[in-house]
Amino acid sequence: MEITYADVAWLARGYELGDQWCLAFARGLAEAEALRRMGASERSIRLLTCEELIDEGLFPGTVLAGRLEDWTVLIEPHGWRASEPGVLRALSAGTEAVMVMRQDHSAHLFGYAVDGEMVTSFDPMIPAWRYGSDPDRLVDAMRAVGFDPGYAPGDGDENEEEIFDHPTVDGALLLAFRLTGVILTQDVLNRSLLGGAVDSRV
């Protein structure tokens, strides 16, 4: 099955999770274990829908976890915890993890970690600025979803319209979906998932 921009448009351009959210994908971890690695307290782990999380004001600070084939997706409406390097490294210990963060009023972020090590991360608005132990590991995959791995705004004489023609959150989501081979859909958000509080105030 080919994964395309049509599979990410509803999330990249919509507001189901707000104008700030974070998604992480961890291979081979059970939902409860992934939540624990995110810092969720055992007593806080329970079944919860995304709608309930938002209606009860449990954000930021509560993470939802759902199984997608061999991966567990961790969903943070209005949150950012998985974007913290130490958290993504913890999720990837003994396996691999992928993260996408959308922040409309600040910087977006993509990260890929393997066995507790950050391999590569970058702001989708500035894909030329990559960091990690092997920052060029995903260059071919980046090109395949439309990123120019050498692009940084201001490098040329582009006008503002041309800058916004470059992929950003949509490209980062497509890259994550293709790396994992799984797709987060609206149906997943509509069902009960395992949730856990990663903030003691929640």
Image (cartoon, rainbow, N blue to C red):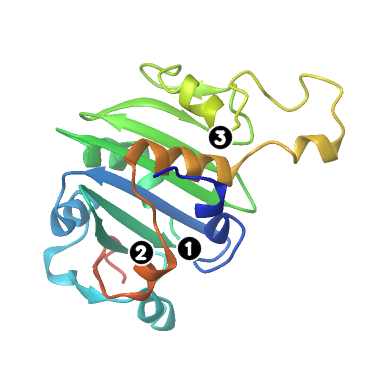
Q: Where does label 2 land, which residue?
A: 61
Q: Distance between the residues labelled 1 and 3?
A: 18 Å
Is 82 left or right of 9, judged from the image as shown? left
Could you tell me residue 37's position as x and y percent?
Answer: 19, 49
Confirm or deny contact between disc 2 and disc 3 (CB under 8 A).
Answer: no
Which disc is residue 123 wearing? 3
Judge whether residue 8 can be spotted in this image.
no
Q: How far apart are marks 1 and 2 (CA)?
A: 9 Å
**Identity of the amino acid at label 2?**
Gly
Could you tell me residue 51's position as x and y percent?
Answer: 40, 79
Q: Distance between the residues labelled 2 and 3?
A: 23 Å
Question: Helix, strand, or loop for circle 3?
Answer: loop
Callout 2 environment at 10 Å: few (<14), some (14 to 19), or many (20+)?
Answer: many
Residue plotted at (60% across, 32% down): 146
Residue plotted at (56% across, 53% down): 6
Q: In which quarter of the image is the N terminus?
A: top left
Confirm or deny contact between disc 1 and disc 2 (CB under 8 A).
Answer: no
Quadrant of res 117: top left
Mark 1 and mark 2 lie on one chain; the one further toward the N terminus is: 2
Could you tell me residue 84's position as x and y percent?
Answer: 38, 42
Confirm or deny contact between disc 1 and disc 3 (CB under 8 A).
Answer: no
**Identity of the amino acid at label 1?**
His
**Identity of the amino acid at label 3?**
Asp
Is 175 left or right of 31, judged from the image as shown? right
Callout 3 environment at 10 Å: few (<14), some (14 to 19), or many (20+)?
Answer: many
In this view, which residue lies farthest toward the front?
1
Which disc is residue 78 wearing? 1
Check the image and report above or below for 42 versus 104: below
Comparing 189 with 89, the one in front is: 189
